[in-house]
Amino acid sequence: MRNKKPEILVIYFSIIVLLVSFLVLPLVTLMIQSFETSQGFNLSNYLSILSNNDIFVAIGNSLKVSTVTAVISTILAFLLAYTINCTRVHPYIKKVIKTGILLPMLLPTITYGFAIMYSFGNEGLITKLVGRNLFEIYGFNGLLMGYVIYTLPAAFLLINNSFKYIDKKFIIVSKLMGDSTVRSFKNTIIRPLLGTLGGAFVLSFILSFTDFGIPASVGGTYNVVSTQLYQVMLGTIPNFNNGAVIAVLMLMPAVLGVLLLNYLEKLNFHYDKVDQTEMIQHKFRDVSLGSISSIILIGMFSVFVVMFIAPFLTAYPYNLKFTLQHFIDTFQSSDLTSVYKNSLFVSILSAVLGTIVTYFSAVLNVRTSIKWKSSLDIFSMITNTVPGMVLGLSYLLLFNGSSLMGTFTIIILCNIVHFFTTPYLMAKNSLSKMNPSWETTGELLGDGWIMTIYRVILPNSASTVIEMFSYYFINSMVTISGIIFLISAQTSLVASKIKELQHFAQFDPIFVLSLLIFITNLLIKLICEYFQSKQTVHQ
């Protein structure tokens, strides 16, 4: 049997050791630390935190803004996905929507806040165009705008993917049978998508609740749980025990969210055979939804326009003369160029090693009959549950004082574990569609298991592997929550450097670095898509 081969066992146990060492043990350490006091183990840390009014208010604020964000993001994501899949809007507009909605994912969330400040602040670009302040940007309003921009692409991807399994023929049949618009919409669209819509809500909520980048820039005095954790851990007097308690409290909504996601998945149903029927022309529907989708996209883009203008002006908004001096200063600063090189180094290694780990994890699960392969699904569920800040803090608590702390190694390991779930599921989905007898055929032809994977399985899943690499690279470039507790002066990355520059109000370097991240990620995405398209042609 394939699972008796020693190379399969070596790879399996290597991955298990990695995940136990850098996922399970850190989380166990976090839980232990949260109960540890000078009098032994008890609940006094939890009682102290929950009786602290600031923490209590911060948790309430997080719940409030995250819930409102999730409602708005789910509705907007549904409208965009419906426009693409159930209208006769011009294909070019559909393509622009599908591509444009994903662009914010190429930027760190901390940049969103600065873009909001420079767009809607007292001297902001949009404020000047409108002639007055539209709203107060610091606090709830700024967080809500930033969170919606942050969570909308993820919610859209989820809903848009599920629309592929909606049979449009039933929409047309429902109309022909005389169903009202509301009844037809409810039975042919909402009912099949109910689980996905709930999933989009939960995903948006979790992403908002656990994000640190946006509140770090526009949170103001509106404290949320992630900023409270940051202050407790990196304040004047760090309190590891209280930090562990807050991290555990942050973990609770995420755990409940993932359990709810699994339950909601049962509500989804797919048709046995999906008929890609073209929708009937309906001018009012197409014009109105095309317009609404365009407004959503333009509204999102308008927030980031300033990022492409301010760095090219001498001193926005006071001196509007064109200049390249900010870019020259950035590239001449060894400090700023080194953090960009650090980010590139970490992202490339995270992408390469992360892709290898997740790909082989999926291969073991799908392409072998190894007894304990379901354990990899369990690890995948755990990594999907743990917020970046919680994982980073767990590493700090477990490895503090060790030779790993303050190194690129621990940051790369954190990225590999933090972003494990999505690439793993990508690979599982791809590998499960392949002929299950390929390994047996390879064995009969004299090829070893590794050689069959290399010569047969890998080429047939190359497009997915490229997508996995792209996912790891981009997320490693933009993450701040996962690495904020792990960076040192020598391992500073662009996202953490932006947080540092904020203290000195150096916004021009912030936008230059943000543009560098954006251009780098866009370039990687385009290159990966080019190679993916070549693979599709060859297959």
Image (cartoon, rainbow, N blue to C red):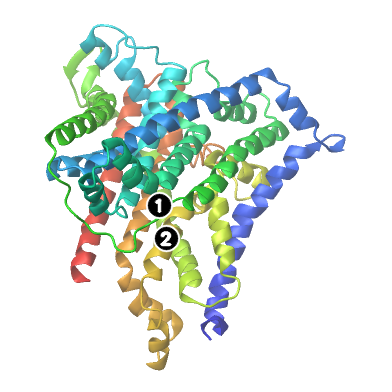
The local crowd at label 2, few if under 14, some if 14 to 19, many if 20 or more residues have their Cα within 10 Å, is many
Q: Is residue 280 left or right of residue 115?
A: left
425 vs 490, nearest the viewer: 425
Question: Which quadrant of the view contains residue 127?
Answer: top left
Residue that badge 2 annotates: 355
At x 36% / y 12%, what residue is drawn?
135
Mark 1, secondary structure of its residue: helix
Residue name at image x 63 percent, y 57 percent: 21
Location of the C terminus by quadrant is bottom left
Counting from the top left corner in percent of width and height, residue 69 is at 43, 29
Res 414 visible: no
Q: Quadrant of residue 77?
A: top left
- The kind of residue tagged 2 is Thr
Which of 34 and 231 lies nearest the eye of the viewer?
34
Outermost residue, right direction? 39
The quadrant where residue 9 appears:
bottom right
Closer to the chain start, of discs 2 and 1, is: 2
Question: Quick check: can you spot residue 87?
Answer: yes
For the point 49% across and 29% down, which residue is it? 67
Q: Which residue is mark 1?
A: 472
Q: Is residue 459 left or right of residue 204?
A: left
Marks 2/1 in contact by CB < 8 Å: the verdict is yes
Q: Position of residue 519 (x, y in %)?
A: 26, 41
- Per the model, the C-alpha gap separating discs 2 and 1 is 7 Å
Question: Tag 2's secondary structure?
Answer: helix
